[in-house]
Structures are given as structure tokens and as C-alpha cells.
Image (spheres, grey):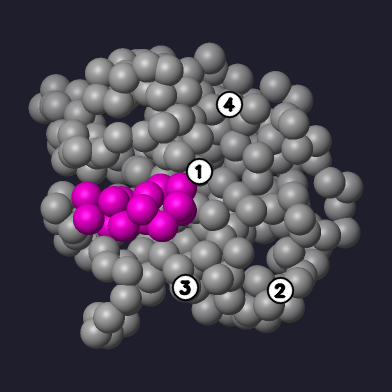
Amino acid sequence: MKTVAGNWKMYKTIEQATEFFSQMSGMAAPRTDKVNVLIFPNYVAMGAVAVSGVVPDWIHLGAQDVAAEAEGAFTGEVSPQMIQSAGATHVLIGHSERRHIMGESADLLHRKLSNALQAGLIPVLCVGETLDERDAGRMQEVIFGQLDTGLAGVALQNGAQLTVAYEPVWAIGTGVNAANEQIEDAHRLIRDHLSQLLGNPVGSSIPILYGGSVKPANFAAIVGLPSVDGGLIGGASLKPDAFAELIAIAEQV
Ligand code: 13P
């Protein structure tokens, strides 16, 4: 089973999101035993499309962020329960834009992840090194550090409770995807580390997605790699045609 997940970032109004899902509803549903489809819209669009019922039942929804607390006086924050009230099942934690642009700390990300897990949301923990870190030979150290802090003290019953996304920062939105060997190398390290941190069979069954300049032209090669359980896609997930192509590619693996 491969996952095709679209991270819309700060794009799409309610109207534009509705148009996207209407177009997806018009296409034949993919084989859900082959491909798991997820979209991470902004909160506003997610709430609206959830209520209007325009989302086909084979597309699952996720939020791009979540509060570190369950409820309370936290202006601007959105709780796991609110996200679940829109029918969403997943939440991104530690996307590189939140780590590097918003400056979210390792401790905050750990609290967000724990809060999501406690509510029964599936965190998609994003990890990845910058180009400077890779060039300095620190890729493994950075990724392990992000996994260690994000998952500190976490115990899972099964691998379906968590997803990890490897998104090298230098590949995000640059048009330069990581080479297949680089992806395999990083995913193998992540897999070994998850098994160490969470034990097996949990660690060995957590899906690991690749993200960073995925598009229809390169996805078949990437999603076909043995260590890759799917893609987390930014730019190419915004257009229904390109997204439908990505789904069809994953379905054929
Ligand atoms: P792009 O696919 O636009 O490179 O974005 C990747 C990403 O950040 C997905 O979370």
C-alpha cells in the first residue's frame, strides 16, 4: 500500500478547494487497497469542504498543524478535537517550514505530537536536513535528533498510529528532488532508528514517505523504491490533473 499525500501549504480559498475536490469526485475512485490518498488543506478550507460534503470518500483529510494543548486560552491555536470534528485523521508535525520559518522548537513539536496521538490523530512527523547540514556530513545526526526529540517517551501499539516523512529541506519547492540512492539511504536509516526507538513490529511497520519536488515525471521511480511507502507532495498536489496522475502512478506500483 502506497500513500499519496498532498500538502497544500498556504494555498487555496474555500472556493478553490471546493473546485479541486469537485474535480477529484468526477474521476474514478482509485483502488483503496493499493493507494491511500490524503490532502492537508488549510483549516478554513478543510472545515468548509468537510461540511459541504464535496470530498470523495476515498480522500482522507489532515491538518497542517495542531495545538500542543487539548483546549483553553491559546489564541490562534486549533486543537486535535477541532481537527477531528472536520473528519480529519492526520496531522503534519514539524514540517520544515514550521521548523525553519516559524521557528518551532523540538520541545514544542514533541508536545504537539503527543497531543495529537493522545486524541487519536495520526501524526505525520516530518524530518530532514538542510543543504549545509548534508554538506557537513550531518544528515544522519540531524534526522536522528528530530526523531529522538519528536518521539521521546512515545509508545505505540502499532505502526498505523504514526507516519514519518523524509523531506530534505534542500529538495522542498526547489525542483531538485533527492536522488534515488539518497532517498534509499535516508529511509533505511530512519527505518532502523524507528525500530530502535519504538521496537518491532511497530518500528518496522510505520509508513515512511518521501517529500521534496515530487511530480508526475519523477514519482514512478521514487514511489517504486523498496524503502518508500509514498509521497508527501506540495506544488504538484495543487492541480487536480497532476494529483490524479500521482495517484495513478502509486496505484500501479
Ligand atoms: P514540494 O513538493 O512543492 O517540493 O513540497 C514538498 C513539501 O514540502 C511537502 O510537504
Identify the residue position indicated by label 3 in the image: 82
Q: Type of residue at label 2? A: Thr
Q: Is residue 62 left or right of residue 117?
A: right
Q: Let me know if residue 6 appears in the view.
A: yes
Report crowding for label 2: few under 14, some 14 to 19, many 20 or more residues within 10 A (C-alpha).
many
The answer to which of marks 1 and 3 sits earlier in the sequence is 3
Crowdedness of circle 3 by 10 Å Cα count: few (<14), some, many (20+)? some
Q: Position of residue 24 (x, y in %)?
A: 78, 58
- Identify the residue at image location x=65%, y=40%: 36
Q: Is residue 184 magenta?
A: no
Observer-nearest of 125 and 14: 125
Q: Which residue is mark 1?
A: 232
- Does any atom of ligand 1 lie closer than 8 Å to the CB of label 3? no
Residue holding disc 2:
18
Quadrant in which the N terminus is drawn: top right
Asked which secondary structure carries label 4, the reply is helix
Please state the total of marks drawn on the protein image. 4
Which secondary structure, mark 3?
A: helix
